[in-house]
Amino acid sequence: MAEEKEKKYAIGLDMGGTNSVFGLVNQRGIVEYKTAISTRAYPDVNDYVKAGVEALRPAIEEVGGIEVIKGMGIGAPNGNFYSGNIEYAPNLLWKGNVPIAKLFSDELGIPARVTNDANAAALGEMTYGAARGMRNFVMITLGTGVGSGIVVDGNVVYGSDGFAGELGHAIVDRSAEARDCGCGRKGCLETYCSATGVARTARLMLEKTNAPSQLRELNPEEITSFDVYKAAEAGEQVAKDIFDYTGRILGAACANFALFSAPEAFIFFGGLTKAGHWIMDPIQEAFDENSLFTFKGKAKLLVSALDGSEAAVLGASALGWE
């Protein structure tokens, strides 16, 4: 009987609406091989799976074949851990329920699992990053939207249907001026605290003040959170006010989220965290001011320790080890 080879690697797939990045990750959390294909180039999901496997094949052969790979993890929009399906993802070409985990498992001959991108980020942080050794924390992803992955007693919270943890859609503003959200409701956290929310706040603040700002030199519709960061670094008060407004909303929301799971930490990931203390200081201040007395001073507010360009692949690969 042939001796079974040691499982030294896991595959991680970060699936976006435009591109998909595949990585081969070793046990130390190092991405040894990375490749990408266009998600949009394959209207038929079966063709997409075949193209992804073909793109990975040279790396699989180089490390010793599929026998040394433990499994595959997929971080995907509307990925459901329980069913293994992508369910009605609005930004993908494939409609309805797509059995993505089974399709990759059948094609590769190894176990495959899927979850949404924020849960994948939480798994990556727990396996390789700032949450190593933690059993209770909340991951907040600050990108185009606000995502979250909640870990309680060492396990990601999936809820009854696999979709628990949509903290970005907690309503933080119920006034008549509350912002419209893509989910169909008004006043959701992500309309204020995502990178796009920051840009939205910037446009509104520039309309309400005559303060000089380098942001006025830009097309208002093209302002990004990074532009606001550069203005804050240049000492502009209006940019500092934008981050203060954003951070205080997010910090107060996190004080409410702490009531649910008493986390050891909130870990923030995404482009908006590059604003550093301009965003993190008001988050901390509002969190401290709004925390219930039994939670004051307990949860740390941390920035992700994972390399931004590899974090999503690492997070997905963490599923492959399970």
Image: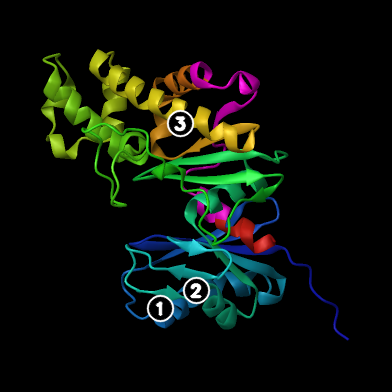
Q: What residue type is labelled 2?
A: Ile
Q: How far apart are marks 3 and 2 (CA)?
A: 34 Å
Q: How crowded is mark 2: few (under 14 residues within 10 Å), some or many (20 or more)?
A: many
**Between tags 3 and 1, which lies in front?**
3
Q: In this view, does 94 lie to the left or right of 125?
A: left
Q: Give the range drawn in magenta.
A: 288-315
Q: Nearer the viewer, residue 86 or 30?
A: 86
Q: Give residue 104's position: percent from left, percent from top.
A: 54, 76
Callout 1 touching callout 2 (CB < 8 Å): yes
Q: Quadrant of the N terminus?
A: bottom right
Q: In which quarter of the image is the C terminus?
A: bottom right
Q: Residues within 10 Å of mark 3 (few under 14, many from 20)?
A: many
- Is residue 44 inside the magenta stretch? no
The numbered mark, 1 or 2, whose residue comes first in the sequence reads 1
Q: Name the residue that disc number 3 marks.
A: 253
Total numbered circles: 3
Q: Name the residue that disc number 2 marks.
A: 100
Q: Give residue 196's position: percent from left, percent from top.
A: 28, 40
Q: Nearer the viewer, residue 188 or 17?
A: 188
Q: Which residue is located at x 30 percent, y 32 percent? A: 226
